Image (tube, rainbow, N blue to C red):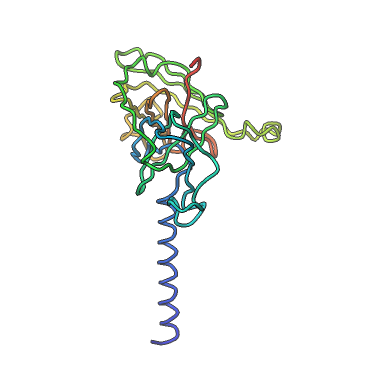
Amino acid sequence: MTRSGRNVAVAALLIAASAAGAQETSENLCRQAPRLSEGAASGPGRIVGAGRVRFVRDGLARKGCPDADPACAAQGYLVPGDRVVLGERRKAYVCATFPQMKTGLDTTGWLPEAVVAPELAPPVTREAWLGVWRRVEARIAIEAGAEPGTVAIDGSATWGAGDPERAQRGSVHLGEIGGTVAPADGALSFAMGEKGTLPLAKGGEFDCKVWMRRVGPWLVADDNLACGGLNVSFRGVYRREGT
C-alpha cells in the first residue's frame, strides 16, 4: 500500500471511530425532559426500595456511563416515594425527570430501572388538561374549546428573562403558541399555520409544531424550536397553578 493509501485508510478509521463515539454519546445522553417529538415514551413513576438513589451520569459526562461503576454516580439523589417523569431506556437504566415542586426547577438523569416503579396512568379527561401550567420562563393556559372534546391553548415563553443584564439590554427572546385541538389518549399535537391550527402532518417545514402529554400531575410539552425567537422552546415539565 502506498503512503497516500495508508493515509486514506487511517483517516477512514479515525472518522469511523469518531462517528462511533459520537453515536455512543448521543445514545447515552439524558439531560432533558422526554422529547415527545421523537416519540419517546413518557409516563409517571415512583422511586421504590430503601435509602437514597443517586442519579447516574450520562455518556457525555463520562465515557461508558450510565453504568454501575461508582465513577458514574452523580451528586443528585432521590428517596423512596419521590415521583418522576419517565423517558427512554438504555440497558438497565431509565432517563427520568424529577420536578421539584417548591423551586420549579427540574433534575434529569439516568436512574437504575430496578428502583423505579412505573405508575398506572388513569384515563385523561378533557378537564384534566384545563388550567394554567407553568415552568421556568414559560406559561401555558388551557381552556375548554368551543367544540365538544376540544381544548384551547395559549402559551408564552422566553429565553434569557432570568438574566438581569440580558433583560436590561432588551435581549430577551420571546415565543408564543396557540391553537384548538382535541386531545386523545392523554396526548395532543398540532401545528400553527397561517390560517390557524393544523394537524401536525399538515404543518409546513417552518411552522411551529407542538406536542403535549399529561403525565401524572404534570404537563409535559415539546416543540420543534420554531415557536419563537432564537433558543426559545416550550419543552419541559409544567406544574398546574394552585396544586
Q: Position of residue 105 (x, y in %)?
A: 55, 31
Determine the residue positioned at 48% across, 42% down: 55
User: In front: 59, or 157?
Assistant: 59
Q: Is residue 67 above or below residue 208?
A: below
Res 193 quadrant in image: top left
Say how many tags the image has: 0
Res 123 quadrant in image: top left
Q: Position of residue 229 (x, y in %)?
A: 54, 36
Res 217 quadrant in image: top left
Q: Quick one: which residue is furthest to the bottom in this view?
A: 2
User: In front: 140, or 208?
Assistant: 140
Left or right: 94 as drawn, with respect to 134: left
Q: Quadrant of the N terminus?
A: bottom left
Q: Quick one: which residue is furthest to the front in this view?
A: 50
Determine the residue positioned at 45% across, 48% down: 29
Q: Position of residue 151 (x, y in %)?
A: 37, 18
Q: Is residue 187 above or below residue 5?
A: above
Q: Is residue 134 above or below residue 57?
A: above
Q: Position of residue 202 (x, y in %)?
A: 31, 34
Determine the residue positioned at 37% across, 38% down: 37
Determine the residue positioned at 44% across, 70% down: 14
